[in-house]
Amino acid sequence: MQSHLLIVDDDDEIRSQLKWALGGAYALLLAGDRARALEQFRTCRPMVVLLDLGLPPNPDSPEEGLRVLADLLSVEKLTKVIIVTGQGEKHNALRAVGAGAYDFLSKPVDLDELKVILRRAFHLARIEREYRDLQRRLNEDGFEDMLGASPSMQQLFTTIRKVAATDAPVLILGESGTGKEKAALAIHRRSQRKDGPFVPINCSAIPETLLESELFGHEKGAFTGAHTQRKGRIQSAIGGTLFLDEIGELPLAIQVKLLRYLQEHRIERVGGRVPIEVDARVIAATNADLERAIRESKFREDLFYRLAVVVLHLPPLRHRGGDLLLMGRVFLNKFAVEFGRDSAGFSPQALAAMQGHSWPGNVRELENRIKRAVIMADGPRITPEDLELTTAVSSGQSPRTLQQARETAEREVIQEALRRNGGKMTAVATELDISRPTLYELIEKLAIERPDRKGESTPAE
């Protein structure tokens, strides 16, 4: 189906020439004045418009053409309007570009140049409209900047709505890259504290010697270099939400002070003796196994139960079904627009490679791979090479069905766990949170070889 192109020019001869030159490539709409142009535009909504600024009733002035430009963009702001103007009127064309026009050409028009500009304009218009449609779907299937149509994500959104209405501490569990901070921010935005601050802190990114001061603040002279009194992150979150990411990395001594805050809603600065009342909600997150850390005396059990009043489990990307391709398309269109790149989509091989990949870095990995692919791609379609996902394709393991994609993902996860744990089945089952019989069944079903204790490969029993 041909795309509609609206040509607005009061010169019958020019309209005829353009109709002859472009009629084979586009479904042309012709107008000689403002009223007819708007009528045609509202009826067919063309993505691209060729507009002569000199229109009746005053063809020697650009004002009528500029009014048409404003009217068109008020109806559809993504329309690409290409200005056609006289040789000595470049300043008027630049005025039009400043008012939202896509590009301009000087008369007499070079048809080859015009065709190139039109192809680019239509391509960009399609990308932008598709991206807008995806953003609308994001608003329908998503929730507070989190996208997901899968049942697991829809259930997560329901839980967030419920917990946001309370002030209870929340513990968010999930692999790296699953969006734990976004989930925390969604809770904050939906809560009665939404007008207060959202204060994030990564407990693993700050040296242990500085972490206590960072969280609780310090008094002047509390230690070398403490030249002034300083308010900590917890106090900065008064009236809002404190988000403690990587809570599993919190040293035991600081865990004690955090527990005291959760119990009493009071803190003491480093070097201070006066308790400070603090009203801030605490949301914590980790990708670590806190129950194992408790067994190994690395995390306090009483702090765990204080934090885990409500526990949210963020599913890994490989368990979210069709969300993978939906999010891939959103990211592709986002970065194509951001970097001004032509992108017609993913090749079939790229889609197969994406479905066959286990995505250990989850949504963050997906976003980064697609961002790189858009920058580095040579052709209009993203390939496995652009995504750096060639291994699965070249090995002939690319899945053809959703079941095959699921089995490929499960196989990679189990193989990695086997390697990490030296083939110890009990340790692997514990890490994957499944029973030993289930693990043996999966190994047999997926024809997995497991390493023996010396690192050699041993067929599954």
Image (tube, rainbow, N blue to C red):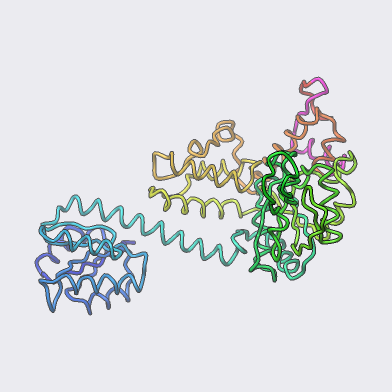
Q: Quadrant of residue 358?
A: top right
- Residue in the image at 13% along x and 61% along y: 89
Residue 152 drawn above or below residue 58: above
Residue 376, percent across and down?
43, 38
Q: Nearer the viewer, residue 214 or 428?
A: 214
Quarter of the image for the N terminus: give it: bottom left
On screen, residue 221 versus residue 42, left or right, reads: right
Q: Which contiguous range is marked in magenta?
A: 434-454
Quarter of the image for the C terminus: give it: top right
On screen, residue 194 versus residue 309, left or right, reads: left
Residue 5 drawn above or below residue 233: below
Residue 40, percent across and down?
27, 75
Q: Nearer the viewer, residue 316 or 171?
A: 171
Q: Quadrant of residue 181?
A: bottom right
User: Is residue 439 covered in magenta?
Assistant: yes
Residue 163, percent across and down?
75, 66
- Residue in the image at 66% along x and 41% along y: 360
User: Is residue 343 covered in magenta?
Assistant: no
- Residue in the image at 80% along x and 56% along y: 267
Residue 330 drawn above or below residue 227: below
Q: Nearer the viewer, residue 437 or 46?
A: 46
Residue 177, percent across and down?
65, 47
Q: Quadrant of residue 412?
A: top right
